[in-house]
């Protein structure tokens, strides 16, 4: 058990932190939503009902959407684009990751799609970006559905008519919610790529070794 915890400490810590933050968000969101309900002279809702509500779905998937878009795009961009001197970029002269994975088919510990080759290998070659962008698409859909319910509830509270899902997708409100998150995600990745050229974090795989020159690209 100790070895399992050691070998998976990073993911376990990240997911535990996520669950704690997610639980805190849900509790705070529930209290905030009930505060707004009282202001509009509406009855408060229970915590389980809030977890199924449009505002909670919207807030959750709106943020997941931007995160998965950022990471999916980052994986794709770093496969083809370079940033000299950044640990977030592969080396300008290329490296082993650019080699044909089919050459490693005979390795006994190679992933199954590599050993099979053909279509399995082609799909596996881009499976990381595909998975991340699929999660983005699912989160985008969740944001749209939750936001649509929340938007129509607000419309009814103000005596206006509800609108269709398609009409909601064309509103400035929906795109303001999405783009305000997207822009911050791409800004943070761009800043990380540039700061990594000049700054270091000893012991981190996201940083170049402390003594490496600024012109060194990649982490090794």
Image (cartoon, rainbow, N blue to C red):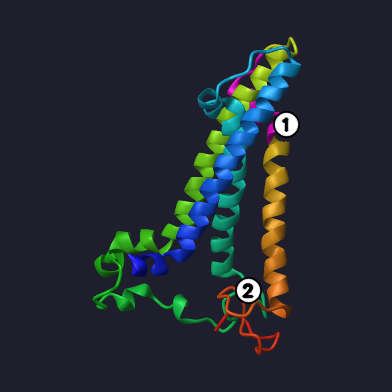
Going by the image, does 3 lie left or right of 164?
left
Q: Name the outermost residue toward the top.
A: 159
Is residue 171 a member of the stretch shown in magenta? yes
Tag 1 secondary structure? helix
| Residue found at x 52% / y 42% | 137
Quadrant in the picture for the N terminus: bottom left
Which of the 4 quarters of the picture holds residue 204? bottom right
| Residue found at x 49% / y 53% | 15
Going by the image, does 97 lie left or right of 117?
right
Q: Position of residue 90 (x, y in %)?
A: 57, 76
Q: Position of residue 146 (x, y in %)?
A: 58, 29
Checking the image for residue 82, the label placed there is: 2
Q: Position of residue 115 (x, y in %)?
A: 26, 69
Checking the image for residue 173, the label placed there is: 1
Residue range in magenta is 162-174
| Residue found at x 73% / y 79% | 198
Q: Is residue 163 above or below residue 64?
A: above
| Residue found at x 62% / y 47% | 66
Q: Is residue 176 above or below residue 103?
A: above
Which residue is at the front of the view, 209 or 18?
18
């Amino acid at each position: 058990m100790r070895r399992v915890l050691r070998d998976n400490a990073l993911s376990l810590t990240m997911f535990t932190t996520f669950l704690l933050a997610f639980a805190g968000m849900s509790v705070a969101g529930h209290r905030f939503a009930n505060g707004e309900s009282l202001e509009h002279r509406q009855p408060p809702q229970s915590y389980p009902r809030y977890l199924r509500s449009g505002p909670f779905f919207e807030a959750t998937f709106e943020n997941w959407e931007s995160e998965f878009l950022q990471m999916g795009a980052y994986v794709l961009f770093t496969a083809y684009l370079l940033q000299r001197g950044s640990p977030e970029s592969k080396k300008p002269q290329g490296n082993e990751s650019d080699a044909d994975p089919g050459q490693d088919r005979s390795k006994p510990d190679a992933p199954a799609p590599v050993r099979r080759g053909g279509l399995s290998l082609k799909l596996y070659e881009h499976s990381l970006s595909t998975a991340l962008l699929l999660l983005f698409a699912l989160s985008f859909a969740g944001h749209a559905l939750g936001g649509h319910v929340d938007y129509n509830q607000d419309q009814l509270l103000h005596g206006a008519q509800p609108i269709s899902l398609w009409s909601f997708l064309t509103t400035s409100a929906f795109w303001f919610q999405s783009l305000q998150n997207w822009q911050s995600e791409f800004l943070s990745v761009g800043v990380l790529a540039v700061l990594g050229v000049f700054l270091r974090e000893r012991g981190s795989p996201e940083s170049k070794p402390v003594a490496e020159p600024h012109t060194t690209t990649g982490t090794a």
